[in-house]
Amino acid sequence: MLDVILRFQMRSLCAVSIACLFSVTCAAKSPHPDKSHHTKDGFKNIYAYEEPGFFDFLRWRWNRLWKKTPSPEDYGFPLAKNDPPFLRFNREKITLTWIGHATVLLQLDGKNILTDPHFSKRASPLQWIGPKRLIAPGLALNDVPPIDIVIVSHDHYDSLDKETVVKLYERQGGQDTTFFVPVGFKDSFKRLGISQVVELDWWDQYDGKDLKIIAVPVHHWSKRHLFAQNKTLWAGWVIQSLDFRFFFCGDSGYTPLFKEIGQKLGPFDLSAIPIGAYEPRWFMRYYHLSPEEAVQVHLDIGSKKSVAIHWGTFILTDEPLDEPPQRLEKARKEKGLPEHEFLVLKHGETIMLD
Ligand code: ZN
């Protein structure tokens, strides 16, 4: 029983941010009538699905208490060997390295781009409690080449790790790294001492010298503190060079938005699409893609090649941690897609694009 209580306490913390979401509903009038996702004091999804409420959340947590759910000891994922000196000096080839969870190093047009950087031990406000990293980052922070661009999808603790953000910024003496964030983050980044921040709303575009960066709508939510529900926006990101298009999904439930993104900005040469944190489905389907939906997103956006992210790193939900790649493989085969079109990488694995 003590074990159950302890487990409950540990898991309660990682669940607290999710719980808080369901305790308030937002029906404020938008000060931006032309932007239907803006509310008086925050943001909302475009598709108003009947999402779970607070009691559904309690139901999920209660069920979870009594059934065998994944534990860190059940897994031993292998780290891939990579080549940090090559990555440090490479300014020619397009590469992607999956560092873990939603953290990806993309090298494009001579720029080093990092998505949702997370190198800490836990996806939690506290480093002694909350979802623990099961495998070291596939590339140690010290081996990560100097970063030009950081992309942040939303404010949840598994996506935005402020400790990592500050380390990245300070590592380069506060120089040369630009942080791209959805609307609502600028002030909190300023408080971290970071001013090189570009804040974009959905469909806004930043025209850089070499790259275009566009924030796109996805179906998710935000919460970092007890009383800060949906105060900051959530987004997927498109990065375009003259002849290459990359899509970073962030976190999302499945909606027709992906077809719209594909029509407006696709097709994509490469995409990073989440495949994990989807059970129980009756609860998570509004916020996270299943592997089958991830394959559908790959098709909707017209992705030539996709890599699986947001799995195998932190235990956030109920499915076994090694299940997402198995279901992805089955779904991929059912759609007649070859393996190289939707890759499951090892932590730390680098792929090169032609
Ligand atoms: Zn999230």
Image: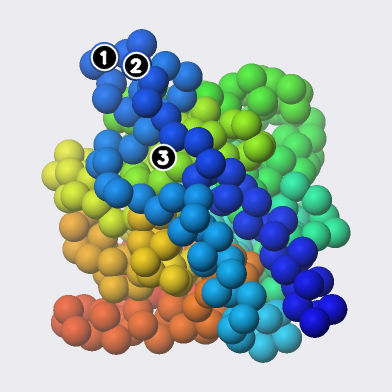
Camera-side mark, 2 or 3: 2
Say which amino acid is labelled 1: Pro
Residue nearest the viewer, comparing 157 with 109: 157
- Give the percent coordinates (x, y) of residue 26: 42, 30
- Give the percent coordinates (x, y) of residue 142: 78, 55
Is 200 placed above or below 329 here? above
Say which amino acid is labelled 2: Ser
Is 321 placed above or below 41 here? below
| Mark 2 → mark 3, Cα distance in angstroms | 19 Å
- Give the percent coordinates (x, y) of residue 240: 33, 40
Residue nearest the viewer, comparing 136 with 277: 277
- Give the percent coordinates (x, y) of residue 17: 61, 48
Residue at label 1? 33
Is 329 placed above or below 113 here? below
Q: Which residue is drawn at the image coordinates 44% and 50% (left, top)? A: 53
Residue at label 3? 235
| Mark 1 → mark 2, Cα distance in angstroms | 6 Å
Camera-side mark, 1 or 3: 1
Q: Which residue is drawn at the image coordinates 55% and 79% (left, top)? A: 321
